Amino acid sequence: MEQFEALWSFQTEDLQAEAIADSIKRSPTRLKVEKTVELIKDRQKQYKQIEDDILAMADRKDILCQAVENARAQLTSLEKQFESNPPQSQEDVKALLSEVSKFRENIRQYEVEISRIARESTVQDKQQLTVRREAASAKKTFDELKAKYEEESRDLKAKLEKQRAVAKGLEASVPPELLEEYMTIKRHISPPVVRLRFGQCSGCNTSLPSATLAKIKNGTLVECETCGRMIIQ
């Protein structure tokens, strides 16, 4: 029975430490810090995507400019061919004019796409500047919030250290196998240990059979079949 009382005393101090740690984690300022960190990450990701898009557009523009240059060179070649060796038949004239028309249409389409890329690049440049400014603003906010949180949590962290030391001091009085069971249950439900109250598990209020009640009163470790907690007298 003494070992169960030792476990109960340890749990009392251990859960008090957990409560302090939880209050630190749930601090409104801490939540704002975490939200700001997510904003910064989002803006960094957005900036990188815009940067990749701009590079892709630049590559595409280079390809199109080269295509325009090639098409113009071929068009010039056709013009020279026309001057040096004029077509002799109507069919040859039509074929030549068709080739000329094709290259001119290609050039027109390439130039339209180049203009579109230029417009989109301008928009992306402006958006990238906006994102960079937002990220810088968020970083400044993060630094301010972090300093505020550290100031606010300093006393609580000191209190937490002290409380954990108290719990650690009581831990040695609990048998290792009992402590291991406690830690295992704690990962799933809290508190891991509860008292027997009016023939019920005080953790989930389940009524226990007489045989189980007898085991508890005799000092046998019993786990609630409903919630899994350890039940002590």
Image: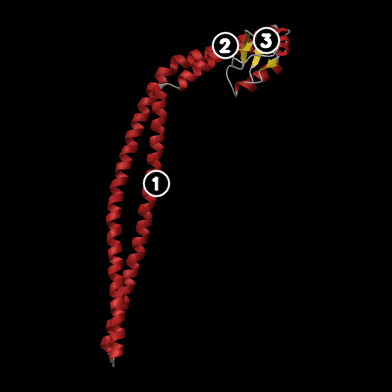
Q: What element carries label 1?
A: helix
User: In the rendering, at what x and y percent does residue 193 appear?
Assistant: 62, 14
Secondary structure at badge 3 equals: helix
**Residue 198 relative to residue 46: left or right:** right
Query: In the image, is residue 114 above or below residue 176?
Result: below
Query: Are dots 2 and 3 in contact, CB under 8 Å?
Result: no
Estimate how packed mark 3 is, as few (under 14), some (14 to 19) or many (20 or more) residues with alpha carbons within 10 Å: many
Report the Cα–Cα distance between label 2 and label 3: 14 Å
Q: How many labels does the image show?
A: 3
Which of labels 1 and 3 is toward the front? 3
Q: What residue type is labelled 3?
A: Phe
Q: Which mark is residue 48?
A: 1
Q: Report the amino acid beneath label 2.
A: Glu
Specify few, some or many for label 1: CA neighbours under 10 Å numbering under 14, 14-19, or 20 or more.
few
The CA distance from mark 1 to mark 2 is: 48 Å
Is 180 displayed left or right of 79 in the figure?
A: right
Toward which corner of the image does residue 98 lie, by quadrant? bottom left
Residue on which the image places disc 2: 13
